[in-house]
Amino acid sequence: MSSQDDIACKKCDEIYTEINYKWCKPCQINGLNQNFASWTSGNETIDKLIQEMQLKIKNYDDMVVEWISFDQFNDIKKIYEDNFNVLYSAIWIDGPFKCDGSDKIRRKRMPNKKVVLEYLNNSQNNNITKGFLNEVKSYSIENDDHSDIITIYGISQNPDTKDYVIVLQDCYCVNCGKIYTDKRYKWCNPCLLNELKQNFENWTSGNEIFDELIQENQLEVKSLNDSIFEWIPYNQLDTIKEIDMTLYSAIWINGPLRYNYDKMEWEKIPNEKINLIYFDSSLKLTKKDDVPYDKIYGISQNPDTNNYILIFQDCYCKNCGKTYTNEKYKWCKPCQINYLKQSFANWTSGNEKIDELIQEMQLKINKYSNLIVEWIPYNQFNDIKKIGKDDSANILYSATWMDGLLEYDCNKMEYKRIPNKEVVLKYLGNNIINEFLNEIKSYFAEHSNTYGKIIKIYGISQDPDTKDYVMVLQNGYCEICKYIYGNIKHKWCKQCFTNSLKQNFTNWTSGNEKIDEFIQQMQLQVNSLNHPIVEWIPYNQFNDFKILYESDFVILYSAIFVNGPFCYYYGKMEWEREPNEKVTLIRLNNSQITIDQFLNKIEKYIDERHRMDTTIELNKTFRELFYAEDYIAVDENINIVKVYGITQNPDSKDYIIVLQDWCCENCNEMYESKEYKWCNSCQIDNLKQSFANWTSENEQIDEIVQNLQLDIEKHNDIIVEWIPYNHFNNIKEIVNVKGDCATLYSANWMNGLLHYEYYKWKRRSNTKVNLKCLHNSQDITDEILNEKIESYYIRNNEGKVDEEDYYCYRLPKIYGISQNPNTKDYIIVLEDGNHCETCGEIYEAIDFKWCESCQVNKLIKNFTNWTSGNEIIDKYIQGMQLELQSHFCAIIVEWIPYNRLNDIEKMGNDSSILHSATWIDGPLKYDVIEWKRISNKKVTLKYLYDSYNITNESLNEEVEPFTDEIGYYYNSIIYGMSQNPDTKDYILVLQDEIVCEKCFQIYKYVNSKKCNPCKINNLKQNFANWTSGNKQIDELIQKMQLESKDYDTVIEWIPYNQLSNIKRTGKIDSNIYSATWIKRNYEVTLKYLSNLQNKNTDEFLNEIKSHFIEYKSIIKIFGLSQDPSTKDYIVVLKNGSHCKICGGLYINSWCKSCQMSVLKNNFEYWTSKNKIIDELIQEMQLNIQNYNDIIVEWIPYDQLNDIKEIGKDAFATLYSATWIDGPLKYNTGSNDVKSYFFKVDDPSHDINFTPKIYGISQNLDTKDYIIVLEDCYCENCGKMYTDIGHKWCKPCQIKDIEQDFANWTSENKKIDKLIQEMQLKINKYNDVIVEWIPYDQFDDIKKIGKGGFSTVYSASWTNGPLQYREDHKKLERKCNEEVALKCLHNSQNITNGFLHEVKNYSISDDGILKIYGISQNPRTKDYIIVLQLASGNFVECKYIKKPWYWTEKLHILNDIIDCLKIIHDNEMVHRDLHTGNILTLPILTYGPFIEKTCISDMGLCREVNLDNMDEIKVYGVMPYVAPEVLRGKTYTQAADIYSFGMIMYFVATRRQPFANCAHDETLALNICNGIRPEINELEAPKSYIELMKKCWNSNPDDRPKAIEIKEEINKQIQDAEKNKIRFSYIGNNKPTHPQAIYTSRLLNPFTENLRKYDNINNNSVEVIDFTKVI
């Protein structure tokens, strides 16, 4: 036990900051302060900087930054120079202070320390810039040689040049001046690569191709663990031995290059054992399927044969030539299995079943560490001693196994025995039955997933005297109590540990019996080594108390627990204390709480799921944790904290809960992550304080970086930074990103990424990054930059499988922003490997380097390299290839030339259509980051006879069965198609092993390999092997067997002697029994069909059938049997379907009959004292039909409290109340169920009601009867809720809204009236309450788009929208909601047009953006419509941008026409429908689509100051405006359909209509004269083009209605899905004309002269005036 003196500072008497190192931070800071007068740099700014950095120390080993006199340096050598600075290496004579490893307490100087001096050019006294100061601060004071951070030692000044010098840790390469790739081992990757390049001229293979290959591989070295690929002269190979025809072992005399970490240099490892694989003469590898290319050392050449040789690490088994199963320990599973099989003849137990069991267990070995179960002769055991019995009364003996266990020696890489092994012998008797064998199998190690808790089996033996068989087990039994250890590996016995705790109960007491009992109970629940031991802890064990929070009910402290809690030390295998542990104390006011309440609180903290872990669940902060009614509220978002014990303040007598430390030292709030000591609020504060330490010199850029930094939430989030360009080196161009007008580069970030490690931030120096350089971005706006970075994330979700077994894709990550000082272009700094190196797009699956665009484009380009000679086949295969949406689509379906198939053999009889074959090339399969072929793949060929005239329909019919097996991804079942050149028959090439080996039929269920025809055949053949003795019964069972669709469930005749342990269930006259079906070892239920003996009548048979029908839809039926004594037939059913009390059939685990009996028996225990009332309640109780029906009760009046009148009519008074006991619910209980009741004033009046009735009561004073109902009446108005399920009352909601009118105003009567009108239109509990929202409610406002009449911003609404909370029965706000602000230009004077648009947004539909309210910019006075924030623009949707997503495009169009139909159904016209007004919303789905499409800009996208619906002015995007509207006619629903036709054009072609010409008067005239955009028939199906043309017909009357379009699109979706329609035509994307405008604007300047062309003859289309107004 530590004393107070051990942990307190001798100077200040405070607890040491670092107790183990006797380091006191306050005293250290004080000493540094006092020392400031002892030194100076001669420059006040430099002095302040050094002082500031000195006072930042937090840890005992942090570096104390110093002013270092320049004469302290010698042996100064220049190592690097650029335009910004110069680097020198030097020796610091005195050296820095560092904690001595041998003396933890004292700091010593490390003399003659090698350092790096960083000269900053022009940094003399009068030129100390902010950049210089920031450069100094960018280095760390952490003294950590094992991480990638760069430590600063101090600052100096060259007395000659007056330049200031930053003195740094030796971390720069002396050769190139770059930061070491591995600082700890002084390794520089660029220098290594340079040395390798220089060495290229010193060797050659004599073959230019191989030289380039070797050089390329050498330059891929990235880490110290990488092998360096070499050309290896053949005379360097010795002791060459053949393993098989192409594989050899050998000794490499010089050996490979490896890095010596001690010498910090590369060196050769001589006499390395290797493997050789020969090439053939064509420079192709000889056939070997398991070539481990990641283990390759290099290439050589045999000078005699001139054959080339691949040199590998020793990774091939010398016996079989296969790669080792475990290469590290040279263990080969096939050889081991083979050796065991050969050894079977060398031993026997003398019993065939035992031998087979041991052999089976031996052949299951899968790892070198698996035990080999053996037959062990009994004479191998000595020192046999009886130790007791196990739970099954089997006798146990301890013994010594003389030869001992056979185990694999990893050092010698061979099996050897461990002699004199202590074991336990478990006697099992001599009767070998299934139970005996199953018990042995249960011990087999492979069956256990519980590490350290299951006893391993070593073998089986037999006592020669008793003939009893003996299991030979691991000695996992406690030597003291003989029970199995709770943890076998660490020999921890729970039983003995529990006994020691019990014995210790007398050595402590809290002085309170209940407290003692509670602690004892918790101690006895300790179940594993990592569980804390809850203790009574004397109060004097705590010191250094600090109050963290205080209220009338609770005080929260931090403190030091002197002795500390118990924890298990695995090395010593014993429990020890962790002294001086920081803990959290929760002190509850005893005057406010009883002992029982206190203990109940602790039990409440300990969650049921973690009760044995003695943990508690706490809220995010203790300020949310404590409140008067409950003291502590348990949140669902748990942060599990250990409970160490209970103590008591001796003065106040308050009890205190002792918890693991969980509070931040700075702010005293609970860590968001206790494991990482992560406090988000403190991290945010630190980042804010550091804003002054850096700048991009651009206010907008600074703000973006700051916002990204303040968005962090977790310890592994990325801190986005402004990164000076000179922090990058090795910059190399990768690819131009065309769509983003950017170039992608790879680079090395020298300082590297910040990451949170061991409770502090550290840098990963030399982080490899990608630089996305934005072309011509010198004057970039924050809007564009935000758009560029929105595809990247700071959340660090490394690719992994989540709790529901879904793979979570790694997100593309942003590290920072930089700027090229020469071009002034801004650069987004990204995680390396996010982007495809071919096209520059972000990978869809980063971990797998999967770029969908490039993969599909490769397939499209390859279409010209193959053909089946049949257009239908070609298009079908192309369509299936373009279904490729993920690397998980394993196989690409192909056209396979027939000559690539060999070994073709017919399967089955001569008429069979199935053949087996070998596909020489094999299928393409995506292997992590590339496609590889699986050569010589066995396949199944299904011949489609007489198929030379194949059609789409017949092809679909043939292929469809092989696409349904695994749903959306079909490629692993079908590999492709081929054609027999002789018969011209087409062939489906399918995967192997899909055909039953017996009947040669394709399995119905391929994955399970279950053949229904064979099942039927086997059943038929088995008919002769059984009989019930009754022909009709036999025929019935046979018929049911042959009709069974469930492969695993076959109804059988079950002989009665196959049933054992038959016991009656329920009452004495019950016909239900439980039993064990011996054959299946199933627990079953038997239903006796009494008095139904053998009768050869139809009535008898129908009776049997009726029982099968009764059970078939409810429970699994196993079969039929017959009691030989009573001759009664028995239905054998799955167990658990019948009531254990009465034997009746459960309905949802509920027995109606027993429920009735319980209710009847209970009649005598209650009465209303009124016969009519009693009979009514009894009748209603006995009417229940389901387990969840309400049981109407007589409810004593004293069960109702908190009674309040809420309404009254002529017949009854309505009250609210709380029913104390609450209603009866099946298998549930409730103490506090809110209910309502009527007090009936006129008993003769019949009250009809729809809500559920709970019961009847009676007022004891007035004698009035009361009907008790569910909570379905509003407490405020007494009326039934409008929505009972959500407890929502529309009249009260409307009333509350009206009363709130006085609390807000927009100061514009029209706006106020509009908002009030919209608020009063709510009709559902979840309708949006449109509000007037003050502008100061919006934060983080970012520009995201601009149209002709408005600008759109994203923002965070602080208070957030109102939402109805059912549990609180009121509206509450959803804070910090992300919204869109549509700011209307020049809208200071509100108009009817603006009001009309707002009203249009009030359409309640998912396809229309939700409106939250209206606001006003206080500076510009422009009005703002506050809308739901969309996730993206329709134009940027990936399904629109890629041509091959045809079905997905149709689904999106279906969404749009759905939205338009809603608008039209509301008797409205959109008026401005174009691609810019269609947005996407995120939705949660597991289907192929992840976006929902919606329409925005509802009503009028035109000048806001128009006061009426002026039909003279035309607004919109010209190509999307109907010709009649351009001519000045009324805008109709048909005009919206015209716009939809243009959207169809964009969806099909990915081109805006008329993008190649100016949008002027000429285009307007052409549109009116019937000119439409061109479309290539290769871009869309004929039916699609026809529909599109109907939509843009010049005659509005000939355009289809929205409902007609929807029906047609749905038909096309079905056709596309059925026929795998995909389009690969890229089209001719010409540049957009500079006067092609795709934002809405006034079009009258271009249309005012169109009327004079009304009579021009148009040969193609008749233009008709259309003036119908909706």
Image: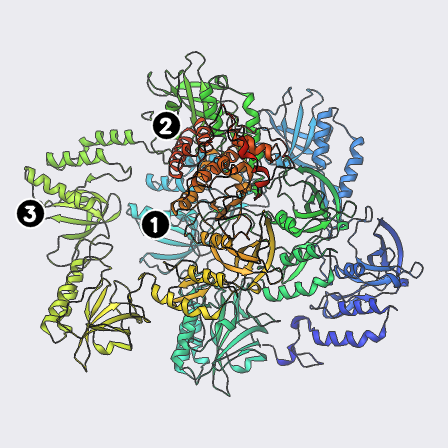
Q: Is residue 125 above or below residue 460?
A: below
C-alpha span from label 1 to label 2: 37 Å
Examine the image and state in which quarter residue 746 appears. top right
Circle 3 SS class? loop
Q: Amino acid at mark 1?
A: Glu
Using the rendered image of the protein, determine whether residue 745 is visible from the camera's viewpoint: yes
Sequence-earlier tag: 2 or 3 = 2
Coordinates of residue 444 in the picture (x, y in percent): 41, 48
Residue 8, image x, y percentages: 66, 79
Determine which residue is flagged by label 1.
Answer: 439
**Sequence-first disc among 1 and 2:** 1
Element under disc 1: helix
Image location (x, y in percent) of residue 681: 59, 66
Q: Nearer the viewer, mark 1 or mark 2?
A: 2
Depth check, front residue: 308 or 1360: 1360
Q: Relative to residue 38, is residue 1159 drawn left or right? A: left
Query: With respect to residue 747, does 857 lie above or below?
Result: above
- Circle 3 residue: 1091
Q: Position of residue 1528 (x, y in %)?
A: 51, 39
- What amino acid does circle 2 point to? Val
Number of residues whose C-alpha sits closer than 10 Å to that of mark 3, classed few (under 14), some (14–19) or many (20 or more): few
Towards the viewer: 395 or 840: 840
Please tell me how crowded label 2 is: few (under 14), some (14-19), or many (20+) other residues with Cα within 10 Å: many
Distance from label 1 to label 3 (Cα)? 42 Å
Residue lying at 69% horizontally and 24% vertically, measured from the top left: 302
Q: Dividing the image into 4 quarters, which one contains the C terminus?
A: top left
Q: CA distance from mark 2 to mark 3?
A: 48 Å
User: For the point 49% across and 87% down, which residue is it?
Assistant: 652
Taking 370 as reference, is 83 left or right?
Answer: right
The residue pinned by badge 2 equals 995
Q: Which quarter of the image is occupied by the N terminus? A: bottom right
